[in-house]
Each structure stands twice: as structure tokens, then as C-alpha cells.
Image (spheres, rainbow, N blue to C red):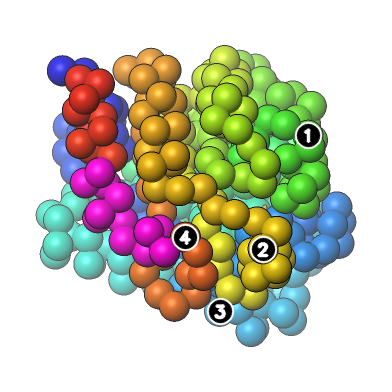
Amino acid sequence: MQEILTAGRYWREKFGITVYKIPISLLGFTCPNIDGTVARGGCIFCENESFSPNLEHKQSKKFYLHPTKPENPYLEFQLRQLEAQYRKTKAVLQKKFGAQKFIIYFQSFTNTYAPLDTLRVLYETALSLEDVVGLSIGTRTDSITEETLGYLQKLSKQHEIWVEYGVQSIYDETLTKINRGHDVANLSNILHLTCKTYELNTCAHLIFGLPDETQEMMLQSVQFALEHGVKSLKIHPLYVVKQTALANDFNKGKFIPITEEAYIETLVKALVMVPKEVMIQRVSAGISNDTLLAPLWCGNKHHQMDKIKIALKKENIDY
Ligand code: SF4
């Protein structure tokens, strides 16, 4: 039976010990799709606070980082926040799972969308924390420069460095519908630079069930990411949370979420296509709070994983 290279298996094979990712949300970061640089309002499904319980949302209205603005009045606070969030989650993971080493995951908003001087201080401080073996940096393909890629390449000589891009779809009409703020040409160019030119470990985030997408389109998006050389995938179904543009569409009957059956069928077909050396970091959604509007099956990650594992077994794949 073929084994999916889950994150747990990947880190264990690479480091010989248990390695866990610790998500961090720092005050001051925003996104060019929210601050007006490329759009306002963000992707139609984005209500970032619902994805990032650590985020101190109200305070972050005071100041936003921007790559062309050198000042960062929050740097000292960000460093304290980084260390505090790391230590808190580390203690939980050590107690619960016996975790030994950690990757700090800059998760919320666009974590290369700041002056490089700020990024250097944050990344290098993160790497200096006890038991940290690397970084994973969540960002957008329109918000990273070659200077930053070159800097990350240097860091990757001594540390485990990953860049995570929201790819979502490779269809311009879909990217427009979800107000993504960039096109597929940008995706292709930056994925190529990151994976091939700078040879950085790259993870692509993909969403199944985007408005009007067929199964064939979703699978083509997976194929595109693999062909560009990504070494990891995160896939999840599109779900609707309250206080988003998508919630308005859903409430007006303009958006119908993907069914659990269709999602799992598409996911299994996608995972059959994925080479065994590509790490799969996520295949489900799990919104366990009252922000979830639809589909309600996205509220229970364990049920989804049980069904996904059963479906994969039929293809002789072990998750
Ligand atoms: S790129 Fe991320 S943070 Fe920015 S609007 Fe889209 S989902 Fe929200």
C-alpha cells in the first residue's frame, strides 16, 4: 500500500525526531488585497480573524506594515509576541505529543509584505529560539521580491525554510471571482522563481469548490502546482464563514458549496496524481466554532478524515 507523505512522516524521516509547526500571528501584518494596494476587502472567503485566533485584531487597525514604508513601530512588540506565542504552543505540543523540535509558521496575512529589514529581524529571531529548526512563511505570489527570495535561499543553507503560497486556482476567471488580486501569470512566474531559480521548498495551498469550478479544473490546478515543482500541498474545501463577501453570496443563493462526496472524490483523484515525495500537509477543513456558515460538514475534521482515509484505502493509499 502506498503511504501519503504526511508532514509527520516527512519531518520524522528528515530529522529523525518529532517536529511540529507552530503557527504565529503578528500584529501589524496585513495583505495587499486588503490594504488597497491591489484591492480592498480581500479574497471573498477571507475573514482573517476566524483563521487566526491568536490575532489581536482590534489593535492591528492602528498600523500596517508595507514593503515601501521602512518604519515599524511594532517591531519590539512583534518580537515579544513571537516569543510568547511560540513558547505557549510549544509547551502544549511537548506535553500532548512529546514534540521535540519546531518549525515556526508565519501564518496570518501576508508574511513577506513588509520591509526586508523587518523580515530579517523577525525570521532570524524566530530561528534563534530554542528548539526551532526552521521557518514556514505564508504569503502571496504578488508579495515577494527576488531580494527576499535570495535572502531566504541563504537562510535555507542552514535551516529548514519553506515558502507557502496561496495558489487556490489556476483559472483567471476564478481568481477574478474570488477577488484574488493577481492572475495566473503571476502565480506561474513566482512559483517558477521560488521552486526552480531559488530552489526553495515550496508549499501550494489549493481550494476545491471555488465558484463555478469543475472537478477537471480543480485537478488541473493540482497538476500546475506539481509541474512548477512544489514540494508540498495543502488542500481544503471552500467553506463559508460569517462576515465575508462569500457569506453574502451564500445567503443570496449565489454560491453553492461543494458537497462532501464531491470533495472527497476530487481529493482522492488529486492524491493519486501526487508523486510520493511530495508532502501533503492538509486535506480537510475544520472550523469548530460558530463562524462557520456552510457547508456544515466542514465543522468536523475528524469525520472528514475518517471518510477520506476510507476512500483512499480503496485506491490502496494509506494516509
Ligand atoms: S491573501 Fe490571504 S490574507 Fe489576503 S485577502 Fe486573501 S485570504 Fe485574506
Mark 4 vs mark 2: give the one in front.
2
> Where are the magenta residues, as a range?
296-307
Which of the 4 image quarters holds residue 307?
A: top left
Q: Which amino acid type is shown beneath numbered disc 4? A: Pro
Q: Tell which of 218 and 82 is nearer to you.
A: 218
Name which of mark 4 and mark 3 comes first in the sequence. Answer: 3
Mark 4 vs mark 3: give the one in front.
4
Residue at 64%, 83% (x, y): give it: 59
Residue at 70%, 59% (x, y): give it: 254
Q: Tell which of 287 and 72 is nearer to you.
A: 287
Which element is circle 3 on?
Answer: loop
Look at the image and tell me whether residue 245 can be seen: yes
- Main secondary structure along the magenta-highlighted residues: helix
Which of the 4 image quarters holds residue 133?
A: top left
Residue at 78%, 55% (x, y): give it: 32
Mark 3 vs mark 2: give the one in front.
2
Q: Which amino acid type is shown beneath numbered disc 1? A: Asp
In the rendered image, which residue does mark 2 sit on? 253
In the rendered image, which residue does mark 4 sit on? 295
Disc on res. 56: 3
Q: Are marks 4 and 3 in contact (CB under 8 Å)?
A: no
Crowdedness near tag 2: few (<14), some (14–19) or many (≥20) residues, C-alpha within 10 Å: few
Name which of mark 3 and mark 1 comes first in the sequence. Answer: 3
Which element is circle 2 on?
Answer: loop
Could you tell me how far apart the alpha carbons at marks 4 and 3 are, in whole angstroms?
Answer: 27 Å
Quadrant housing the C terminus: top left
Could you tell me how far apart the alpha carbons at marks 3 and 1 are, in whole angstroms?
Answer: 33 Å
In the rendered image, which residue does mark 1 sit on? 172
Q: Is residue 298 magenta?
A: yes
